[in-house]
Amino acid sequence: MVELETTIRNRAGIHARPSAMIAQMAIKFSSRIFLEKNGNKINAKSIMGIITLAASFGSKIRITAEGSDEVAAAEAIKALFESGFNEELG
Amino acid sequence: MIGNEPKGFSVLDLLSLELKEQNALDLSCVAGRAGLGRQITVPDINRPGLALAGFYESFAWNRLQVFGRGEYAYLSKLDAEGSYEAVNTLFSYDIPCCIFTSSLNPSSSFTDAAEKAGCPVLVTSLNSNEFSGRVLRVLSDIFAPKTTMHGVLVEVFGIGILLVGDSGVGKSETALELIERGHRLVADDVVEIRCVNGSILMGQGANKVIGHHMEIRGLGIINITHLYGVGAIRDKKQIQLVCQLEDWDPDKVYDRIGMDELSTDILGVKVPMLEIPVKPGRNIPIIIETASMNERLKKMGYHSAKEFNQNIMRWLESENARTLYFSRDDY
């Protein structure tokens, strides 16, 4: 199992478009990927789940991945968060 | 899309048009039958008053020449005076046909000249005003830009949906299920699309003989009118949405939110388009039904995906404000 931490960098937070990007990235991997914020843990392959995190600007997210490609998966999701989803950064 | 040049449209075609009551032209040919094959090339009419008076500059000879009461009275005057020059000059032009309105019967000297020139003379019972309105409508319909597309046109909850996609992807089966669920078939396989008024795409079956038949693999040709009744069919319908069915491609990214609006171009008109991946277990007819209702909502000004995202953004913003407030030093 791999665990990484990241922070929301884009000003608008995780609304529909970024969550779609996360889910689309996550389904490329066979590992089970989860996002965790304030004790809420959700499946990173579900758009609706990601939105329910209400991850606003500056919140901390823990990414966990478990499976054959867990390292690559967690890194890829983290990179996505770091990039700020091609949106305006705060 | 198969390109489709407008076929020639002759005076005979105009006479043999099958038009409904409110569009009927009520034309009959009284002279010049030999010239019924003359082509109508311009969807417009001309009142030849000036030409009869001898003024031929900018004479729109290639249009339908419509003779109303005024022209008729002038012709009668010329006839009484025994001068036939004006009429002969008129027929020296290659005009498609002469049409007399209000059941006015042209004099024998006029019809003789027409016979000689091989120009058809038609008479209608309508008055000039009504006739020009109708004939312009009919001609603009005939001369409208046209194309044919491979697909199925159905009406779902009042929205005209064109289902396109490769052969065997299940367009006809989807349409059949939609019909079963109470929606209507407009055309299967070959859909003729005309651009009316420059912005409306009218779709209909390419051929009346094919009518509302469908080919279902394993069943063969079935007649929808006989099987499901007249309530299950429609002659033509405006195309308001295009649904592209395709085999599920695991490498392709499909829209999961619905905020990026795709559109496709048909005859220069933009139509909203959805790409719908087909996979066993996915009930495509229900997806199409939902797409149709969603399209209606959009037309009413309610965009589900956008509204949803706005709510999320508002929520995130308030969450943001709260975090900021609680993290103040003087709290």
Image (cartoon, rainbow, N blue to C red):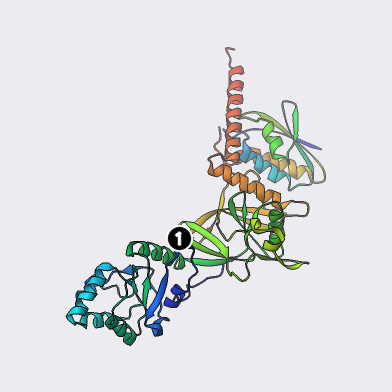
Residue that lies at the very extreme toward the top in this rendered image: B330
Task: State the image quarter where residue B15 is shown.
Answer: bottom left
Query: Relative to the observer, which residue lies in front, B223 or A33?
Result: B223
The residue sitting at 53% across, 40% down in the picture is B301
B301 with respect to B91 (left or right): right
Q: In x, y percent, where is residue B235?
A: 58, 61
Which residue appears at 61% of the width and 22% of the height? B323
Whole-percent x, y for residue A34 in the image = 76, 36
Q: Which residue was labeled with disc 1?
A: B22
- State the count of labels: 1
**The C terminus of chain B sits in image quarter:** top right
Q: Position of residue B208 (x, y in %)?
A: 59, 69
Q: What secondary structure is marked by label 1?
A: helix
Residue farthest along the bottom direction in this orientation: B116
Q: Amino acid at mark 1?
A: Gln
Residue at image point 64% right, 66% down? B189
Q: Indicate the quadrant where residue B135 lies.
A: bottom left
- Crowd around label 1: few <14 · some 14–19 · many ≥20 (10 Å): few
* Front residue (pair B191, B12): B12
Q: Chain of mark 1?
A: B
- Left/right placement of residue B42 relative to residue B168 reads left
Please tell me which residue is depicted at 79% across the width and 43% down the height of the picture: A31
Looking at the picture, how far across and down is residue A45, in whole percent? 73, 41
Query: From where the camera sits, is residue B136 visible?
Result: yes
Q: Quadrant of the N terminus of chain B?
A: bottom right
Residue A83 visible: no
